[in-house]
Protein backbone atom coordinates (compact mmCIF):
# COMPACT_ATOMS: atom_id res chain seq x y z
CA UNK A 1 0.00 0.00 0.00
CA UNK A 2 1.30 3.43 -0.84
CA UNK A 3 2.25 5.67 2.00
CA UNK A 4 0.65 9.04 2.38
CA UNK A 5 3.36 11.56 1.63
CA UNK A 6 2.58 14.04 4.37
CA UNK A 7 6.16 15.28 4.23
CA UNK A 8 5.30 16.86 0.87
CA UNK A 9 2.62 18.88 2.63
CA UNK A 10 5.44 19.93 4.94
CA UNK A 11 7.60 20.92 1.96
CA UNK A 12 4.75 23.07 0.71
CA UNK A 13 4.34 24.47 4.21
CA UNK A 14 8.02 25.41 4.21
CA UNK A 15 7.48 27.19 0.90
CA UNK A 16 4.57 29.30 2.15
CA UNK A 17 6.38 30.11 5.42
CA UNK A 18 9.43 31.28 3.45
CA UNK A 19 7.24 33.42 1.21
CA UNK A 20 5.46 35.00 4.18
CA UNK A 21 8.80 35.74 5.83
CA UNK A 22 10.00 37.42 2.66
CA UNK A 23 6.86 39.49 2.26
CA UNK A 24 6.04 40.44 5.84
CA UNK A 25 9.12 40.05 8.04
CA UNK A 26 11.88 41.41 5.82
CA UNK A 27 12.35 45.14 6.10
CA UNK A 28 11.25 45.32 9.74
CA UNK A 29 14.59 44.45 11.29
CA UNK A 30 13.46 40.92 12.10
CA UNK A 31 14.52 39.07 8.96
CA UNK A 32 16.25 35.80 9.93
CA UNK A 33 16.94 35.04 6.26
CA UNK A 34 19.54 37.78 5.94
CA UNK A 35 21.16 37.49 2.54
CA UNK A 36 18.19 35.65 1.05
CA UNK A 37 15.08 36.73 -0.77
CA UNK A 38 12.83 34.37 1.14
CA UNK A 39 9.83 35.20 -1.03
CA UNK A 40 11.58 34.08 -4.22
CA UNK A 41 12.89 30.99 -2.44
CA UNK A 42 9.33 30.09 -1.45
CA UNK A 43 8.18 30.31 -5.06
CA UNK A 44 11.05 28.07 -6.21
CA UNK A 45 10.12 25.49 -3.57
CA UNK A 46 6.56 25.56 -4.94
CA UNK A 47 7.81 25.10 -8.51
CA UNK A 48 9.94 22.01 -7.88
CA UNK A 49 7.14 20.45 -5.82
CA UNK A 50 4.65 21.11 -8.62
CA UNK A 51 6.85 19.23 -11.06
CA UNK A 52 6.91 16.22 -8.76
CA UNK A 53 3.15 16.23 -8.20
CA UNK A 54 2.15 16.67 -11.83
CA UNK A 55 4.65 14.09 -13.08
CA UNK A 56 3.32 11.63 -10.55
CA UNK A 57 -0.21 12.14 -11.84
CA UNK A 58 0.67 12.11 -15.54
CA UNK A 59 3.61 9.72 -15.85
CA UNK A 60 3.42 7.40 -12.81
CA UNK A 61 -0.27 7.02 -12.03
CA UNK A 62 -1.15 7.92 -15.63
CA UNK A 63 -4.36 9.69 -14.74
CA UNK A 64 -6.62 10.14 -17.76
CA UNK A 65 -5.99 13.53 -19.35
CA UNK A 66 -9.60 14.80 -18.95
CA UNK A 67 -9.52 13.83 -15.26
CA UNK A 68 -6.17 15.57 -14.90
CA UNK A 69 -7.62 18.84 -16.19
CA UNK A 70 -10.79 18.48 -14.13
CA UNK A 71 -8.73 18.06 -10.99
CA UNK A 72 -6.54 21.04 -11.82
CA UNK A 73 -9.60 23.20 -12.50
CA UNK A 74 -11.27 22.11 -9.27
CA UNK A 75 -8.10 22.75 -7.31
CA UNK A 76 -7.10 26.12 -8.73
CA UNK A 77 -9.81 28.11 -10.42
CA UNK A 78 -12.66 28.54 -7.88
CA UNK A 79 -10.38 30.12 -5.28
CA UNK A 80 -8.38 32.06 -7.89
CA UNK A 81 -11.33 33.63 -9.69
CA UNK A 82 -13.10 34.42 -6.43
CA UNK A 83 -9.95 36.20 -5.25
CA UNK A 84 -9.60 38.12 -8.51
CA UNK A 85 -13.26 39.13 -8.50
CA UNK A 86 -13.16 40.41 -4.92
CA UNK A 87 -9.88 42.26 -5.43
CA UNK A 88 -11.02 43.83 -8.70
CA UNK A 89 -14.25 45.09 -7.14
CA UNK A 90 -12.31 46.37 -4.11
CA UNK A 91 -9.81 48.28 -6.22
CA UNK A 92 -12.57 49.78 -8.34
CA UNK A 93 -14.68 50.88 -5.36
CA UNK A 94 -11.95 52.04 -2.98
CA UNK A 95 -9.32 53.42 -5.36
CA UNK A 96 -11.43 53.91 -8.50
CA UNK A 97 -8.81 51.83 -10.30
CA UNK A 98 -9.87 49.52 -13.07
CA UNK A 99 -7.22 48.33 -15.53
CA UNK A 100 -9.09 46.21 -18.05
CA UNK A 101 -5.98 44.94 -19.83
CA UNK A 102 -4.28 43.82 -16.63
CA UNK A 103 -7.47 42.14 -15.45
CA UNK A 104 -7.86 40.32 -18.77
CA UNK A 105 -4.23 39.16 -18.66
CA UNK A 106 -4.73 37.88 -15.12
CA UNK A 107 -7.99 36.05 -15.84
CA UNK A 108 -6.53 34.44 -18.98
CA UNK A 109 -3.32 33.45 -17.14
CA UNK A 110 -1.04 35.41 -19.42
CA UNK A 111 -0.14 37.95 -16.78
CA UNK A 112 3.47 36.78 -16.44
CA UNK A 113 4.11 38.26 -19.90
CA UNK A 114 1.87 41.30 -19.57
CA UNK A 115 3.03 42.41 -16.13
CA UNK A 116 6.58 41.12 -16.26
CA UNK A 117 8.03 40.78 -19.73
CA UNK A 118 6.05 43.76 -21.05
CA UNK A 119 7.13 45.90 -18.11
CA UNK A 120 3.62 47.22 -17.52
CA UNK A 121 2.84 48.66 -14.10
CA UNK A 122 -0.06 46.79 -12.51
CA UNK A 123 -1.77 46.85 -9.14
CA UNK A 124 0.16 44.93 -6.48
CA UNK A 125 -2.75 42.55 -5.62
CA UNK A 126 -2.46 41.07 -9.12
CA UNK A 127 1.30 40.73 -9.35
CA UNK A 128 1.79 37.35 -7.67
CA UNK A 129 -0.36 35.64 -10.32
CA UNK A 130 2.75 35.42 -12.51
CA UNK A 131 3.82 32.25 -10.71
CA UNK A 132 0.43 30.59 -11.19
CA UNK A 133 0.65 31.40 -14.90
CA UNK A 134 3.99 29.62 -15.17
CA UNK A 135 2.68 26.60 -13.28
CA UNK A 136 -0.43 26.33 -15.45
CA UNK A 137 1.58 26.69 -18.66
CA UNK A 138 3.90 23.94 -17.39
CA UNK A 139 0.96 21.66 -16.60
CA UNK A 140 -0.38 22.06 -20.13
CA UNK A 141 2.99 21.22 -21.66
CA UNK A 142 3.44 18.20 -19.37
CA UNK A 143 -0.03 16.96 -20.32
CA UNK A 144 0.88 17.24 -24.02
CA UNK A 145 4.01 15.19 -23.35
CA UNK A 146 1.84 12.62 -21.57
CA UNK A 147 -0.46 12.42 -24.60
CA UNK A 148 2.51 11.96 -26.94
CA UNK A 149 3.90 9.27 -24.66
CA UNK A 150 0.65 7.32 -24.40
CA UNK A 151 -0.53 7.65 -27.96
CA UNK A 152 2.71 7.59 -29.93
CA UNK A 153 5.01 5.80 -27.46
CA UNK A 154 7.34 8.78 -27.36
CA UNK A 155 9.74 8.59 -24.43
CA UNK A 156 8.29 11.00 -21.89
CA UNK A 157 11.52 11.46 -19.95
CA UNK A 158 13.35 12.46 -23.15
CA UNK A 159 10.80 15.16 -23.99
CA UNK A 160 10.89 16.47 -20.43
CA UNK A 161 14.69 16.60 -20.57
CA UNK A 162 14.47 18.59 -23.79
CA UNK A 163 12.17 21.02 -22.02
CA UNK A 164 14.69 21.51 -19.22
CA UNK A 165 17.57 22.10 -21.63
CA UNK A 166 15.56 24.49 -23.82
CA UNK A 167 14.51 26.47 -20.76
CA UNK A 168 18.10 26.83 -19.63
CA UNK A 169 19.16 27.88 -23.13
CA UNK A 170 16.57 30.66 -22.99
CA UNK A 171 17.94 31.76 -19.62
CA UNK A 172 21.47 31.89 -21.00
CA UNK A 173 20.44 33.66 -24.19
CA UNK A 174 18.28 36.26 -22.46
CA UNK A 175 21.03 36.92 -19.93
CA UNK A 176 23.70 37.30 -22.61
CA UNK A 177 21.79 39.24 -25.25
CA UNK A 178 19.24 41.38 -23.38
CA UNK A 179 19.29 43.87 -20.54
CA UNK A 180 16.05 42.63 -19.01
CA UNK A 181 15.64 42.81 -15.25
CA UNK A 182 14.51 39.90 -13.06
CA UNK A 183 10.84 40.46 -13.86
CA UNK A 184 11.34 40.68 -17.58
CA UNK A 185 13.43 37.51 -17.69
CA UNK A 186 12.35 35.21 -14.87
CA UNK A 187 8.64 35.86 -15.13
CA UNK A 188 8.69 34.25 -18.57
CA UNK A 189 7.44 30.69 -18.78
CA UNK A 190 10.23 29.59 -21.11
CA UNK A 191 12.83 30.83 -18.61
CA UNK A 192 11.27 29.18 -15.53
CA UNK A 193 9.92 26.04 -17.16
CA UNK A 194 13.03 24.19 -16.06
CA UNK A 195 12.10 24.69 -12.42
CA UNK A 196 8.99 22.53 -12.87
CA UNK A 197 10.34 20.15 -15.52
CA UNK A 198 13.53 19.29 -13.65
CA UNK A 199 11.72 17.55 -10.80
CA UNK A 200 9.27 16.02 -13.31
CA UNK A 201 12.23 14.41 -15.10
CA UNK A 202 13.58 13.06 -11.81
CA UNK A 203 10.21 11.46 -11.08
CA UNK A 204 10.44 9.60 -14.41
CA UNK A 205 14.03 8.63 -13.62
CA UNK A 206 12.95 6.97 -10.38
CA UNK A 207 9.81 5.50 -11.96
CA UNK A 208 11.93 3.66 -14.52
CA UNK A 209 13.75 1.77 -11.76
CA UNK A 210 16.96 3.79 -11.72
CA UNK A 211 18.85 3.99 -8.47
CA UNK A 212 18.17 7.05 -6.33
CA UNK A 213 20.85 9.71 -6.67
CA UNK A 214 21.04 10.13 -2.89
CA UNK A 215 19.77 8.19 0.11
CA UNK A 216 19.58 8.63 3.85
CA UNK A 217 21.28 11.65 5.37
CA UNK A 218 22.88 12.37 1.98
CA UNK A 219 19.54 13.90 0.93
CA UNK A 220 20.64 16.89 3.01
CA UNK A 221 23.43 17.63 0.51
CA UNK A 222 21.24 18.72 -2.42
CA UNK A 223 18.78 20.34 -0.03
CA UNK A 224 21.39 22.51 1.68
CA UNK A 225 23.23 23.12 -1.58
CA UNK A 226 20.05 24.23 -3.31
CA UNK A 227 19.19 26.56 -0.45
CA UNK A 228 22.70 28.03 -0.43
CA UNK A 229 22.48 28.80 -4.15
CA UNK A 230 19.29 30.80 -3.57
CA UNK A 231 21.30 33.48 -1.74
CA UNK A 232 21.06 37.01 -3.07
CA UNK A 233 24.69 37.17 -4.16
CA UNK A 234 24.32 34.13 -6.43
CA UNK A 235 23.65 35.18 -10.06
CA UNK A 236 20.06 34.47 -11.06
CA UNK A 237 21.01 32.24 -14.04
CA UNK A 238 22.95 29.99 -11.66
CA UNK A 239 20.27 30.20 -8.99
CA UNK A 240 17.48 29.03 -11.27
CA UNK A 241 19.43 26.26 -13.03
CA UNK A 242 21.96 24.57 -10.73
CA UNK A 243 20.25 25.77 -7.56
CA UNK A 244 16.86 24.64 -8.77
CA UNK A 245 18.23 21.26 -9.87
CA UNK A 246 19.55 20.61 -6.38
CA UNK A 247 16.18 21.52 -4.84
CA UNK A 248 14.46 19.23 -7.34
CA UNK A 249 16.76 16.36 -6.35
CA UNK A 250 15.97 17.04 -2.70
CA UNK A 251 12.18 17.07 -3.03
CA UNK A 252 12.03 14.00 -5.30
CA UNK A 253 14.35 12.06 -2.97
CA UNK A 254 12.71 12.96 0.33
CA UNK A 255 11.11 9.51 0.30
CA UNK A 256 14.63 8.10 0.76
CA UNK A 257 15.53 10.52 3.57
CA UNK A 258 16.07 9.34 7.16
CA UNK A 259 13.01 9.30 9.44
CA UNK A 260 14.25 12.20 11.53
CA UNK A 261 14.35 14.48 8.48
CA UNK A 262 10.89 13.40 7.36
CA UNK A 263 9.58 14.12 10.85
CA UNK A 264 10.74 17.72 10.45
CA UNK A 265 8.57 18.07 7.36
CA UNK A 266 5.73 16.16 9.01
CA UNK A 267 5.37 18.56 11.92
CA UNK A 268 1.81 19.67 12.46
CA UNK A 269 2.51 23.35 11.76
CA UNK A 270 4.19 22.73 8.41
CA UNK A 271 1.71 20.14 7.13
CA UNK A 272 -1.30 22.22 8.10
CA UNK A 273 0.25 25.31 6.51
CA UNK A 274 1.03 23.29 3.39
CA UNK A 275 -2.52 22.02 2.94
CA UNK A 276 -3.83 25.58 3.21
CA UNK A 277 -0.96 27.26 1.38
CA UNK A 278 -2.73 27.96 -1.91
CA UNK A 279 -5.43 30.17 -0.41
CA UNK A 280 -2.89 31.84 1.87
CA UNK A 281 -0.68 32.50 -1.14
CA UNK A 282 -3.54 34.13 -3.01
CA UNK A 283 -4.57 36.40 -0.15
CA UNK A 284 -1.19 37.45 1.21
CA UNK A 285 -0.57 39.77 -1.76
CA UNK A 286 -3.04 42.60 -1.00
CA UNK A 287 -1.93 42.60 2.64
CA UNK A 288 1.69 42.80 1.56
CA UNK A 289 0.71 45.94 -0.35
CA UNK A 290 -0.38 47.64 2.90
CA UNK A 291 2.23 46.23 5.27
CA UNK A 292 4.14 49.51 5.58
CA UNK A 293 0.92 51.31 6.40
CA UNK A 294 -0.59 48.96 8.97
CA UNK A 295 2.61 47.21 10.09
CA UNK A 296 4.06 43.86 9.17
CA UNK A 297 2.55 41.77 12.01
CA UNK A 298 -0.99 43.10 11.47
CA UNK A 299 -0.74 42.61 7.72
CA UNK A 300 0.57 39.06 8.21
CA UNK A 301 -2.30 38.15 10.53
CA UNK A 302 -4.79 39.59 8.05
CA UNK A 303 -3.26 37.56 5.20
CA UNK A 304 -3.45 34.32 7.18
CA UNK A 305 -7.01 34.95 8.36
CA UNK A 306 -8.24 35.73 4.84
CA UNK A 307 -6.33 32.75 3.44
CA UNK A 308 -7.90 30.39 5.97
CA UNK A 309 -11.35 31.82 5.27
CA UNK A 310 -10.81 31.25 1.56
CA UNK A 311 -9.68 27.68 2.18
CA UNK A 312 -12.55 26.64 4.45
CA UNK A 313 -15.33 28.58 2.77
CA UNK A 314 -14.39 28.21 -0.87
CA UNK A 315 -11.28 26.31 -1.99
CA UNK A 316 -11.84 23.04 -0.11
CA UNK A 317 -15.65 22.85 -0.51
CA UNK A 318 -15.48 23.76 -4.21
CA UNK A 319 -12.73 21.25 -4.88
CA UNK A 320 -14.65 18.46 -3.14
CA UNK A 321 -17.94 19.35 -4.84
CA UNK A 322 -16.43 19.48 -8.32
CA UNK A 323 -14.31 16.36 -7.93
CA UNK A 324 -17.24 14.37 -6.57
CA UNK A 325 -19.19 15.16 -9.74
CA UNK A 326 -16.38 15.04 -12.27
CA UNK A 327 -14.08 12.25 -11.13
CA UNK A 328 -16.02 10.41 -8.42
CA UNK A 329 -13.46 11.24 -5.72
CA UNK A 330 -14.65 11.00 -2.10
CA UNK A 331 -15.91 14.25 -0.67
CA UNK A 332 -13.68 14.11 2.41
CA UNK A 333 -11.93 17.43 3.08
CA UNK A 334 -8.30 17.42 2.01
CA UNK A 335 -7.35 18.49 5.53
CA UNK A 336 -8.66 15.18 6.91
CA UNK A 337 -8.04 12.64 4.14
CA UNK A 338 -7.59 9.07 5.41
CA UNK A 339 -3.92 8.13 5.76
CA UNK A 340 -4.06 5.29 3.22
CA UNK A 341 -5.70 7.27 0.43
CA UNK A 342 -4.68 9.93 -2.01
CA UNK A 343 -3.21 12.59 0.19
CA UNK A 344 -3.83 16.29 0.46
CA UNK A 345 -1.86 17.07 -2.66
CA UNK A 346 -3.45 14.36 -4.79
CA UNK A 347 -0.39 12.09 -4.74
CA UNK A 348 0.41 8.52 -3.79
CA UNK A 349 4.03 7.50 -3.42
CA UNK A 350 5.61 4.16 -2.61
CA UNK A 351 7.31 3.74 0.72
CA UNK A 352 10.98 4.59 0.89
CA UNK A 353 11.76 0.87 1.24
CA UNK A 354 10.57 0.16 -2.29
CA UNK A 355 13.57 1.97 -3.73
CA UNK A 356 11.95 3.42 -6.83
CA UNK A 357 8.68 3.89 -8.61
CA UNK A 358 7.45 1.08 -10.81
CA UNK A 359 5.78 2.04 -14.06
CA UNK A 360 2.10 0.99 -14.05
CA UNK A 361 0.33 -0.51 -17.05
CA UNK A 362 -0.49 2.00 -19.77
CA UNK A 363 -3.93 3.53 -19.46
CA UNK A 364 -6.09 5.06 -22.17
CA UNK A 365 -6.26 8.80 -22.71
CA UNK A 366 -9.91 8.95 -21.65
Image: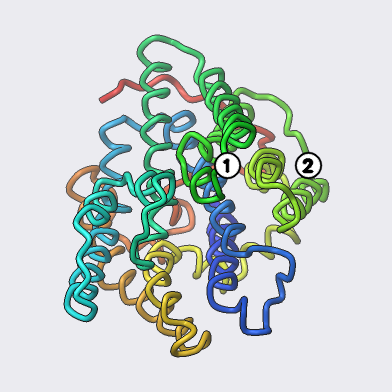
Local secondary structure at mark 2? loop
Quadrant for the C terminus in the image: top left
Graded by Cα atoms within 10 Å as few (under 14), some (14 to 19) or many (20 or more), the crowding at tag 2 reads some
The residue indicated by pointer 1 is 179
Task: Tell me if I can see residue 247 in this picture.
Answer: no
Picture coordinates of residue 292, whole percent (x, y): 49, 84
Task: Tell me if I can see residue 229 in this picture.
Answer: yes
Whether 335 is drawn above or below 174: the answer is below
Picture coordinates of residue 303, whole percent (x, y): 42, 78
Residue 307 left/right relative to 34: left
Picture coordinates of residue 286, whole percent (x, y): 37, 73
First in sequence, mark 2 or 1: give its number.
1
- Rounded to the nearest angstrom, the CA distance separating label 2 from label 1 is 41 Å
Q: Return the residue nearer the eye: 211 or 337.
A: 211
Q: Return the residue nearer the eye: 327 or 49.
A: 49
Which residue does the image show at 77% across and 54% down from the upper left? 228
Whether 126 is drawn above or below 207: the answer is below
Whether 313 is drawn above or below 274: the answer is below
Residue ranking furthest to the top: 152
Which residue does the image show at 26% across and 42% down from the upper left? 70
Residue 35 left/right relative to 167: right
Q: How many marks?
A: 2
The residue indicated by pointer 2 is 215
Which residue does the image show at 45% across and 38% down from the upper left? 189
Picture coordinates of residue 258, whole percent (x, y): 76, 53
The circle drawn on residue 16 is none
Local secondary structure at mark 1? loop
User: Which tag is nearer the camera, tag 2 or tag 1?
Assistant: 1
Res. 103 image quadrant? bottom left
Whether 342 is drawn above or below 264: the answer is above
Residue 135 left/right relative to 245: left
Res. 48 image quadrant? top right
Amino acid sequence: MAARATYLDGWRGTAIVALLIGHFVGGFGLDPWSGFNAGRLGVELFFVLSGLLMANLLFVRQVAIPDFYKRRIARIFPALYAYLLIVTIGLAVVFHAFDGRSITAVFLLGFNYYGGAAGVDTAVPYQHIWSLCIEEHSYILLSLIAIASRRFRVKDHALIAVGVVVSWVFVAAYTAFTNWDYYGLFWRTEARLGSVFCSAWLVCWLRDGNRPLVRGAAVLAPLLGGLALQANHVPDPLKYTVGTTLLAVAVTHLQFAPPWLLRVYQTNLLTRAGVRSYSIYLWQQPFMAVRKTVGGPIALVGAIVMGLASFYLLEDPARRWLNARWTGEPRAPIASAPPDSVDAVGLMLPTAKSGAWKEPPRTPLV
